[in-house]
Image (spheres, helix red, strand yellow):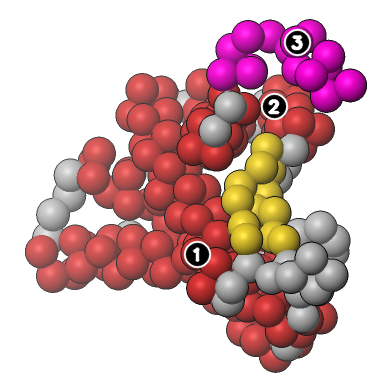
Amino acid sequence: MSMHNESRRPSILNWFLATEFRQLLLSALVIAFAFSIRYLVFGKYRLEYVSATILAVILAFIPHELSHRHIARKLGYYARYRVWLLGLALAIVFPLLTLGSLIFAAPGAVVIYPKYPFGYVSRRDYGLIALAGPLANIIVGYTSLVLLTMMKTIIHMYSFLLILILFVVMEINLWLAMFNLIPFPPLDGSKVFAWNKALWLVAFALSAVPLFLMLYGLRFFI
C-alpha cells in the first residue's frame, strides 16, 4: 500500500522525501515561502526582504528541529525529522489565502522512538526534548537583538541590509518559538507545560514579550 501511494506522488516530492535532510530542506523552503508572501505582495524592498526572510528561516527552522533531535539522541532515544504532508499543505494554503497574515508553521516534526521495544518516553524527557527547539530560537533571536542594539548604540552602523537581516532573523526566531510554545497538542508547548509550568511560562514570556513590543511600535532595539 505504501509503495503504491509513493508511486502516485510527483517525482520531485519523492525526491524531497527520500532523506531526512531533504525533508528538512523542503519544510524550510515552504516556511520561507509562507513568511515571504507578505513582502512579495506589500513590500517596498521585495528582493531584500525575501532574501532576509529565507536566511532567517534557515537560521530558525533547521536549528529548531535539529535541537529536538540532538537532545532526544543525547537522552538515548532514536529520533529523526519527518515531514507531515497535511501540515506542509496547510503551511502553503494559509498564507496564500490570507496574504501572509496567518502562518501555520508546523510542516513536520522530529519523531521520537523509545529506547526499548516496549519502552516509553517520560514526561520529563518529552518536556526537555520539546523545549530544546524553542530554546534554540530564543537564543538566536536574542543574539540578533544584542547585535542590533550594538550596531545602533556602540558601533553606529546603519547598513540597511544588515539591520534588515538581523531584525528579520530576530522576528522569525522569536515568532517560531512563541508559536511552538502554545500549550496545545501537538505543539512543543503542550509537552513543556505538562512537564514544568514555570519553565514554560519563562520560555513563552521570553519569546512573546519582544514580539508584543514590536506589535505596539515600541522598537527599543533599533
Dot 3 crowding, Cα within 10 Å, few <14, some 14–19, many 20+: few
101 shown above or below 16: below
Q: Is residue 171 visible?
A: no
Q: Nearer the viewer, mark 1 or mark 3?
A: 3
Q: Is residue 123 visible?
A: yes
First reached walking from the N terminus: tag 1 or tag 2: 1
Quadrant housing the C terminus: bottom left
Q: Nearer the viewer, mark 3 or mark 2?
A: 3
Give the magenta range. 1-15
Q: Amino acid at mark 1?
A: His
First reached walking from the N terminus: tag 1 or tag 3: 3
Tell me: 109 left or right of 210. Answer: right
Q: Nearer the viewer, residue 129 or 56?
A: 129
- Secondary element under disc 3, as helix, strand or loop, is helix
Q: Magenta segment, principal secondary structure?
A: helix
Residue 59 on the magenta segment: no
Q: Nearer the viewer, residue 188 or 78?
A: 78
Quadrant housing the N terminus: top right
First reached walking from the N terminus: tag 3 or tag 2: 3
25 shown above or below 179: above
Q: Which mark is residue 92?
A: 2
Q: Amino acid at mark 3?
A: Ser
Q: Quadrant of residue 69?
A: bottom right
Q: Which mark is residue 7?
A: 3
The percent coordinates of residue 202 (x first, y second) are 61, 84
Tell me: 161 left or right of 66. Answer: left
Q: Amino acid at mark 2?
A: Ile
Q: CA distance from mark 1 to mark 3?
A: 32 Å
The percent coordinates of residue 186 (x first, y second) are 81, 58
Q: Quadrant of residue 35?
A: top right
According to the picture, the residue beneath numbered tag 1 turns out to be 70
